[in-house]
Image (spheres, grey):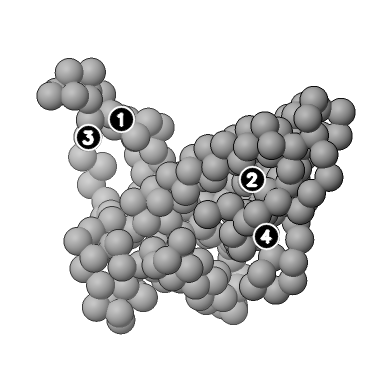
Amino acid sequence: MELGVDRDEIVVDVVSAGRAGILGIGAEPAKVRVRLIGDESAAAAAGLSAVSNLLGLLGVEATASIRSSGSGPDDPAVNDVQGEDAGLLIGRRGETLRALQFVINMMLTRGEEPLGPVVVDVEQYRRRRAQELRRLAERTARRAVSTGRSVHLDPMPPADRRIVHMALADSSDATTESAGEGADRHVVVSPIADQPGAREGRGRRAQ
């Protein structure tokens, strides 16, 4: 549908990312909801402008869009970046992406009318990373229970540790806690004491 407005005047909410299918079988098109930007989307619009300007200054061949306008602190606006050079913005385990998001939010909070927060993502990297961390948490819990020993994961940023903690929050077999200081802060997954075969032990850091 033609709305007769510029790209930066609309919000594109991704309802379903769709599926590629196998040899075209089972493929599903992506579903999006397009609407005009209103006052409630001020953070999303400001974030889009800030991300687009920063991409231009960095000379990155990529385009920013609004994936979700958000509804408040617990449901922030999401700006997504896609394009030929988009992968350069992720970095090792998302380090570059986290730095980019930090800079964007600093820009938004220093204006005449502070806005935010906004989440900056690159081709849905954050969703894929969350899925990967949940699978890691489940595998590690099984390992801890089967060996009866605690398993130390590699150091992670706070957002990643939170995903691991949440993934096992309702587990009746394993429990989690954060350990270490600074850059060495990591998650320890331990079997619950009353599980068969559980015993005390520090365990090895997971590879």
Which numbered disc, 1 or 2, marks the residue closer to the eye?
2
Q: Distance of mark 2 from mark 4, alpha carbons? A: 10 Å
What residue is at 52 percent from the left and 54 percent from the top? 207
- Secondary structure beneath dot 3 equals loop
Name the kind of residue labelled 3 in the image: Met
Give residue 125's position: percent from left, percent from top. Answer: 40, 51
What residue is at 39 percent from the left and 48 percent from the top? 124
The residue positioned farthest toward the right in the image shown: 194
For marks 1 and 2 on the same chain, the one whose residue lies earlier in the sequence:
1
Q: Distance of mark 1 from mark 3, alpha carbons? A: 20 Å
The answer to whether residue 73 shows anywhere in this view is: no
For marks 2 and 3 on the same chain, the one whose residue lies earlier in the sequence:
3
Name the disc covering residue 18, or none: 1
For marks 1 and 3 on the same chain, the one whose residue lies earlier in the sequence:
3
Give residue 97's position: percent from left, percent from top. Answer: 44, 65
Could you say which is closer to the camera, residue 9 or residue 59? 59
Which numbered disc, 4 or 1, marks the residue closer to the eye?
4
> 102 above or below 19?
below
Question: Is label 4 in contact with label 1 (beta carbons under 8 Å)?
Answer: no
Could you say which is closer to the camera, residue 112 or residue 104? 104
Question: Is label 3 in contact with label 4 (beta carbons under 8 Å)?
Answer: no
Name the disc covering residue 186, or none: 4
- Secondary structure beneath dot 1 equals loop
Q: Distance of mark 2 from mark 3, alpha carbons? A: 41 Å
Name the kind of residue labelled 1 in the image: Gly
Q: Name the residue under label 3.
A: 1
Give residue 47's position: percent from left, percent from top. Answer: 46, 64
What residue is at 28 percent from the left and 29 percent from the top? 19
Q: Mark 2 points at which residue?
A: 164
